[in-house]
Image: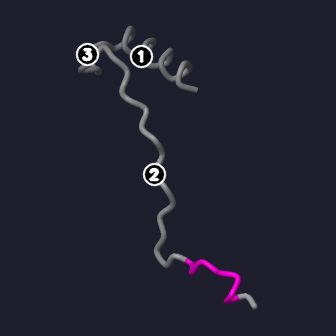
Amino acid sequence: VAVKRSQTLAAARAKHPQRFSKATDPKILALPGPAWINQPKESTETEAA
């Protein structure tokens, strides 16, 4: 996925260089973990019994 993304960005830079401030690809950041409004309680073995 990263290679395909880099190729797409390179093609876009070649076609419209004025739209890009840098000649390097942005860092691929890790996806954030889950976000909860009301996080469910973790069930334990003692609660289930």
Question: Of helix, strand and loop, which mostly describes the magenta segment?
Answer: loop
Query: Which residue occupies 53% across, 24% down?
Result: 2
Q: Residues within 10 Å of mark 3 (few under 14, many from 20)?
A: few
Residue that badge 1 annotates: 12
**Residue 15 magenta-highlighted:** no
Screen quadrant of the C terminus: bottom right
**Of the image marks 2 and 3, the number of the one nearer the N terminus:** 3
Q: Quadrant of residue 15?
A: top left
- Tell whether 33 sits left or right of 19: right
Front in this rendered view, residue 16 or 41:
41
Please determine whether, in this image, residue 48 is positioned above or below residue 36.
below
Residue to which mark 3 is pinned: 18
Instruction: Check disc 1: other Cα within 10 Å, few if <14, some if 14-19, many if 20+.
Output: few
Q: Are marks 3 and 1 in contact (CB under 8 Å)?
A: no
Classify residue 26 by image quadrant. Answer: top left
Mark 2–mark 1 CB contact (< 8 Å): no
Distance between the Cα atoms at labels 2 and 1?
Answer: 27 Å
Spot occupied by residue 9 in the image (x, y as percentages of width and height): 43, 19
Extreme residue toward the top, this view = 14
Quadrant of the rendering where the N terminus is positioned: top right
Q: Amino acid at mark 3?
A: Gln
Q: Please report whichever mark, 3 or 1, sits nearer to the chain's N-terminal start.
A: 1
User: Compared to 27, does 10 lie above or below?
Assistant: above
Q: Amino acid at mark 1?
A: Ala
Q: Which residue is mark 2?
A: 32
Residue that appears at 67% across and 89% down: 47
